[in-house]
Amino acid sequence: MRFVALAFSLTLCPKPLMRPTAIETEIGQIPLQNCLYNASGARCTTGEELDSLARAPTGAVLAKSATIAYRKGNPKPRYRDIPFGSINAMGLPNLGIDFYLDYAAAFSAEKPLFLSVAGLTTAENHTLLKRIQKAAGVGAVELNLSCPNIPGKPQTGYDVAQTEHLLQGVFAFYDKPLGVKLPPYFDRVHFDQMAAVLNRFPLAFVTCINSMGNGLHIDVERETASLKPKGGFGGIGGLYAKPTALANVNRFYKLLDGIPIVGCGGVQTGTDVFEHILCGASAVQVGTSLMKEGLACFTRLGEELQSLMREKGYVRVADFKGKLKSL
Ligand code: SIN
């Protein structure tokens, strides 16, 4: 009887049967077979890059933040690997929303495709989301409130009133899963103020954190900044960002009324992934390690995480999610 049922589902069901994994998770209503996936910006702009991510051992594919039109981005060099992480001032280079909508319509991998949106104005964000609302194949949207690299454009996430205004406009029409990507916060009052705003909206998730904006890395030999745009100022990722990322994940995990957190920042090892989840992350994005190591980082991180879980006697992510103890 079991054989008949299996043969029936293999014949009629177009998707292979999913076996539960130790690192499966869910972001609210969205199940993921693997708690790891790429951060928006890291190797996820072109069709080839997205196809590679679709084949990688990750729980989702997240595309580069899109604007309405194609953007070339800032002049190069605009990304550098640096000793404990990375610095970037990319300036939102992307292929434009039409490309990502076409890609989503044809997407057939056994995991969700998330789009990221970074309109340069409130009106552009509304237009982008109205287009996505009508489109097929989009698992969720990450609304980027935190790109630090557009000259003359402040990060929306540092303006509580503007964030509230933007979200009010968005949720007046948008009814599909939508989360926001926040910048890092450093003052407890700012956590409280932003959480109070976010709690007013039916957000599917909150991603903490984008890169730490406006760092400066120096090329000592040439006595210049390492990057060309913005006088060399750029967003800092990697290990430099990890303690700040963990603090943001943990604070928002406590302050948000059940909105799932996606952790991002400083993930170089399975232990780093474990720490994000312990602080409250439901899933964890990887940016700088993906840039430095390529797709192989996902296999390694997944194995390291599972090995640590086995050592500690945890069988699933939910066993330790948000269970950071006090001293
Ligand atoms: C960029 O394209 O400048 C990076 C995107 C971001 O930090 O949100």
Image: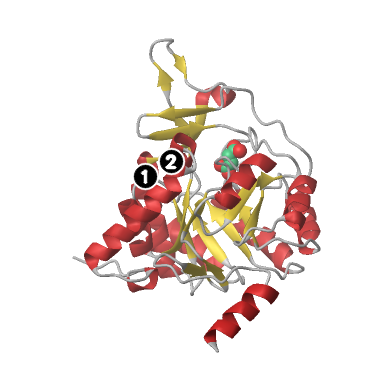
Q: Looking at the picture, which amino acid does disc 1 mark?
A: Gln
**Which numbered marker is on residue 268?**
1
Residue 45 is drawn in which quadrant?
top right
Q: Label 2: which residue? A: 289
Separation (CA) of disc 2 from disc 1: 6 Å
For the N terminus, the quadrant is: bottom right
Q: Is residue 307 left or right of residue 77?
A: left
Q: Residue at x 57, y 48 (%)?
A: 53
Q: Residue at x 71, y 31 (%)?
A: 72
Mark 1 burial class by Cα count in 10 Å: few <14, some 14-19, many 20+ = many
Q: Is residue 39 above or below residue 70?
A: below
Q: Secondary structure at mark 2?
A: helix
Q: In this view of the protein, can residue 85 be seen by the observer? A: yes
Q: Is residue 10 left or right of residue 284?
A: right
Q: Looking at the picture, which amino acid does disc 2 mark?
A: Ser
Residue 142 is drawn in which quadrant?
bottom right
Please provide percent x and percent y for residue 180: 58, 58
N-term mark: 2 or 1: 1
Please provide percent x and percent y for residue 120: 71, 44
